[in-house]
Image (cartoon, grey):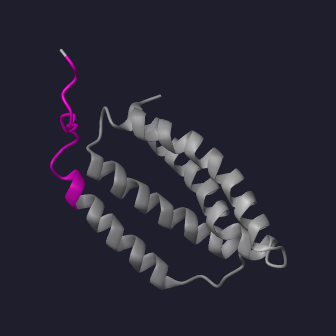
Amino acid sequence: MPVWLQTVVLLVLSNVFMTFAWYGHLRDLRESPLWIAIAVSWGIAFFEYCLQVPANRIGSGQFELGQLKVMQEVITMIVFMIFATTYMRRPFSMDLVYATLCLVAAAYFVFRGGGTPEPPAIAPPT
């Protein structure tokens, strides 16, 4: 599987977990004490990190740091729109589509220069 596809798939999956960790408790644990919502969210977020950290490590060989970040944000908005309308049963909002399109425009600017990774901030020991 190409590096770019591995990165995107892992970021999509990590965003699904992240979105449930951040917002799922608003539907499912509304009546539960706050500490339970926090503990459940942390448990879900663990799996998000198990996917997001490898996504960034794999992607860092092909994408610049800014490209990884903007790609993550575009994916986040797409996953959030699906989550909000299906799981949270919120009405579809064109404002979320417009916000996502703004992020796509941001992606254009960070990707137009190519995908050469930035040099490491700290030189490896010699």
Relative image position of residue 104 (x, y in whole percent): 33, 65
| Camera sees residue 9 | no
Residue in front for this viewpoint, 107 or 19 = 19
* Residue positioned most to the left: 113
Q: Is residue 6 above or below residue 89?
A: above
The magenta segment: 109-125
Relative image position of residue 18 (x, y in whole percent): 59, 57
- Name the residue at 65% across, 75% down: 85
Residue in front for this viewpoint, 70 or 3 = 70
Q: Quadrant of residue 58?
A: top left
Relative image position of residue 11 (x, y in whole percent): 50, 48
Q: Quadrant of the C terminus?
A: top left
- Name the residue at 41% across, 35% down: 57
- Name the residue at 46% across, 39% down: 55
Residue in front for this viewpoint, 73 or 91 = 73
Residue in front for this viewpoint, 30 or 62 = 30
Q: Is residue 99 above or below residue 10?
A: below
Q: Is residue 84 magenta?
A: no
| Camera sees residue 5 | yes
Q: Is residue 119 magenta?
A: yes
Q: Is residue 97 above or below residue 68?
A: below
- Name the residue at 23% across, 52% down: 111
* Residue positioned most to the right: 31
Q: Is residue 121 above or below residue 103?
A: above
Relative image position of residue 7 (x, y in whole percent): 44, 40
